[in-house]
Image (cartoon, rainbow, N blue to C red):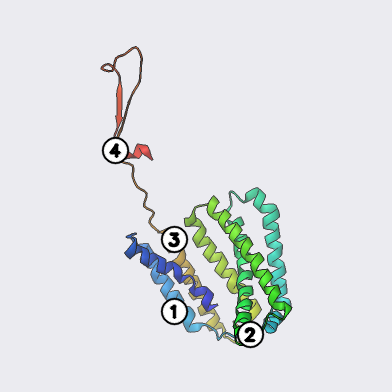
Amino acid sequence: MIITSLTLLLNLKSAVLAHFMLKERLRQMGILGCVSCIVGSVVIVIHAPQEHTPASVQEVWILATQPAFLVYVTVTLSIVGVLMLHFEPAYGQTNILVYLGICSLMGALTVVSIKAIGIAIKLTLEGMNQFRYPYAWVFLSVTVVCVITQLNYLNKALDTFNAAMVSPIYYVMFTTLTITASAIMFKDWSGQNMSSITSEICGFITVLSGTIILHLTREEEHPNATGSITWYDEDPSKGLAEAHYITLNNSDYFH
């Protein structure tokens, strides 16, 4: 959970660097968003659970085939199927949640699968070949399918809707679903008291709020049209001296 939550700090880094390097003005609400990201991250780190790292791909497979996670995967794939087959043709071009819902749901499965692949690679480099087990190839196949689907629908969302809307909504949905999937599969919160869990949730909500504020207050600078335009009515019965000239100097007319 801690790694997934802190990836939202990439938005903070981008905003700060853009302020100093690209001269994009960080407004007061943007500063509030940065502070919210920092405070929420500190709360998450303080109350983060002790993460258990599986010792083999077989152990990850056991976690992935437990009933609770199988139910989660079944529900996820069912929702993705409904979104693809029913909602995308009818509402994909008008409702941003259709594309981003597919991205986020598949993205959560991607993160879980990639964690298994990472463990397999690490142990293989240490001399314990994990790719001789079929489980590793199953996780690799799931990762490839999920990544392709995720990127496909994310590109559709960016092509259809404003990136300023896509980014914060996608961050919220993807991170929330990823933490949910990890909590179900790896049982990150087992053994923690309610106070610590509540603090982590509050910290996570604070980080998400800061991220949304950063994106919503990002200043988009559009170059204003300057100058003027002049034309005349081109009445052939009149000479140039008698033509009616019209000149506009207000840049608002050119937007």
At 41% from the left and 68% from the top, the residue drawn is: 12
Looking at the picture, does residue 254 appear above or below residue 186? above
SS at circle 2: loop
Badge 2 vs badge 4, beta-carbon distance below 8 Å: no
> Does any portion of residue 45 appear in the rendered image?
yes
Badge 1 vs badge 3, beta-carbon distance below 8 Å: no
Q: Which labelled disc corresponds to residue 42?
A: 1
Identify the residue position indicated by label 2 in the image: 54
- Residue type of the residue flagged with mark 4: Gly
At 60% from the left and 69% from the top, the residue drawn is: 177
Residue 55 point in image, percent of width and height: 64, 87
Residue 129 point in image, percent of width and height: 66, 84
Pointer 1 or 4: first along the chain = 1
Badge 2 vs badge 3, beta-carbon distance below 8 Å: no
Q: Which labelled disc corresponds to residue 228?
A: none
Pointer 1 or 2: first along the chain = 1
Q: Which labelled disc corresponds to residue 227?
A: 4
SS at circle 1: helix
Spatial CA span between label 3 and label 4 = 32 Å
At 29% from the left and 38% from the top, the residue drawn is: 227
Pointer 2 or 3: first along the chain = 2
Identify the residue position indicated by label 3 in the image: 215
Spatial CA span between label 1 and label 3 = 21 Å
SS at circle 4: loop
What count of labels does the image hold?
4
Pointer 2 or 4: first along the chain = 2
Pointer 3 or 4: first along the chain = 3
